[in-house]
Amino acid sequence: MHVSTKGRYGLRVMLDLAHQNGARPATLKGIAARQDLSEKYLWQVIRPLAAAGLITSVRGAHGGYRLARPTTEITLKDIYFALEGPCELVPCAESPKHCRRDGACASQGVWKDLQDLIVAQMRSQTLQAMVERYDAQHSRCTYEI
């Protein structure tokens, strides 16, 4: 399993949109500035998120992007799968029939179990929980002058 730049940036975009609370659509330019990311590269992130039904675009002078569903209904699994595809530690864990040693391999079950644990953990992490974790960590920060 590998989380590419696209996956990492995609999560940042989703968290940024979650922090906007849907009050008004967030522009790509605004997201890029807040997240210190290339606006050009963000297009590669926005498209699959929209195709997966995680975000919607709003046209017009005050248009931009917003979450398509409540933060409690979007999981890390949704975001990861939209940007990276299925979680596949080893090819035989997802599609055992692709392995010539299917049924005779002692490690196949271990990889499958580990993959299932990772996906279950991703499914348990809602966007809302990630926002709350971030907010809690940053509300505890105090700066002395």
Image: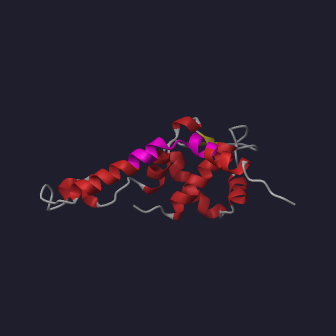
Nearest to the observer: residue 67 or residue 133: 133
Q: Is residue 96 left or right of residue 12?
A: left
Question: Where residue 15 sits in the image (x, y, percent)?
Answer: 62, 48
Quarter in which the N terminus is drawn? bottom left
Does residue 69 appear anywhere in the picture? no
- Which residue is located at x 64 percent, y 49 percent? 134
Instruction: Point out the stretch of residues depicted in magenta.
Output: 119-132
Question: Where residue 17 sits in the image (x, y, percent)?
Answer: 65, 46
Nearest to the observer: residue 74 or residue 40: 74
Q: 132 above or below 42?
A: above
- Which residue is located at x 49 percent, y 47 percent? 76
Residue farthest to the front, as pictured:
144
Nearest to the observer: residue 3 or residue 114: 114
Q: 47 above or below 99?
A: above
Residue 124 belongs to the span the image colors magenta: yes
Which secondary structure is most common in the magenta stretch? helix
Question: Where residue 6 sits in the image (x, y, percent)?
Answer: 53, 60
Question: Where residue 25 sits in the image (x, y, percent)?
Answer: 70, 42
Residue farthest to the left, as pictured:
104
Residue 41 belongs to the span the image colors magenta: no
- Which residue is located at x 34 percent, y 48 percent? 116
Q: Is residue 95 left or right of residue 42?
A: left
